[in-house]
Amino acid sequence: QAVAFFIAGYETTASTLQYMAYCLALHPEVQEKIVSEIKEQLGDEVPTHEGVTKLKYLDSVIHETLRMYPPGGSADRVASEEVTIKGITIPKGAGVMVPIANVMKDPEYFPEPDKFKPERFYEGSVDPISFLAFGYGPRLCIGMRLSLLEMKMAMVHVLRRVKFLKTDDLQETLKIKPGSRLNIPDQVVAISGVMRETR
Ligand code: HEM
């Protein structure tokens, strides 16, 4: 359980913050919109649990980052009974892996899936079953609320102080470490292409 908490509880949130820094470096207009929202909603207040819940645009940006770069590879289940879906029979007891990233790149649920568009969560109506970054149902990620809170707190502190900027060698398509069950970014590529500047 302790190991699970370090991997599930730490690495996923840390990777998402890294993916988000990357997305913000590529989309400065999104970054500035978050900074304005923080100023409008919180002023110079120390961010609290209650305070960060007011940051709806930041919430959408985190969701869009997780849609494009979900750290979790699949949600795994065991069939409790035999079922046939679209001609494929899944026998009772079979393991089923739901590929999280593929579902969230399906244009039927997310038009223009390769475009980073936080607005789809801010203004649009996303079918909740198609957003699978934290899984779904009774075995949904137990740390979802904690991690969303952590990421919002971190981003408020960081974006008040620095700007993420892209360098010339930033790759517009992020490489994922091959074979990584946790969809970990290729750290060197992600970090070397994102620069920080003090605000
Ligand atoms: C960005 C952050 C995170 C992401 C993307 C994420 C993603 C996921 C996913 C996809 C699952 C599988 C859900 C399913 O099968 O339906 C899961 C389960 C789980 N997560 Fe997370 N997670 C995150 C943060 C955390 C944190 C902060 C903790 C602990 C403090 C945590 C602990 C767990 C545990 C214990 C499970 C297993 C739950 C169960 O089987 O009932 N996760 N997570």
Image: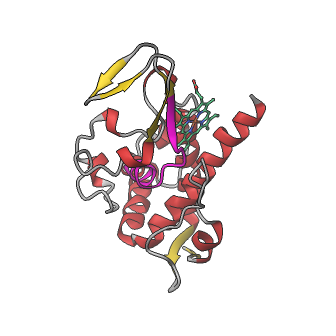
Instruction: Indicate how the structure is coloured in the image.
Output: secondary structure
Ligand 1 shown in quarter: top right
Give 96 or 148, whichever is nearer the viewer. Answer: 96
Name the residue furthest right: 2
Give 144 or 33, whichever is nearer the viewer. Answer: 144
Magenta residues (range): 60-76
- Is residue 18 part of the magenta span, yes or no? no
Q: Residue at x 50, y 24 (%)?
A: 94
Q: Position of residue 130 (x, y in %)?
A: 33, 38
Q: What is the total number of numbered labels drawn onto the structure image? A: 0
- Is residue 70 part of the magenta span, yes or no? yes
Image quadrant in which the C terminus is located = bottom right
Q: Residue at x 40, y 67 (%)?
A: 32
Q: Residue at x 36, y 62 (%)?
A: 33
Name the residue furthest bottom: 168
Image quadrant in which the N terminus is located = top right
158 versus 198 height, above or below: above
Instruction: State left or right for residue 92 relative to residue 153.
Output: left
171 versus 24 height, above or below: below
Q: Position of residue 155 (x, y in %)?
A: 54, 55
175 versus 133 height, above or below: below
Quadrant of the image occupied by residue 184: bottom right
Quadrant of the image occupied by residue 3: top right
Q: Position of residue 21 (x, y in %)?
A: 52, 64
Instruction: State left or right for residue 177 relative to residue 32.
Output: right
Q: Position of residue 55 (x, y in %)?
A: 41, 46
Give 67 or 144, whichever is nearer the viewer. Answer: 67
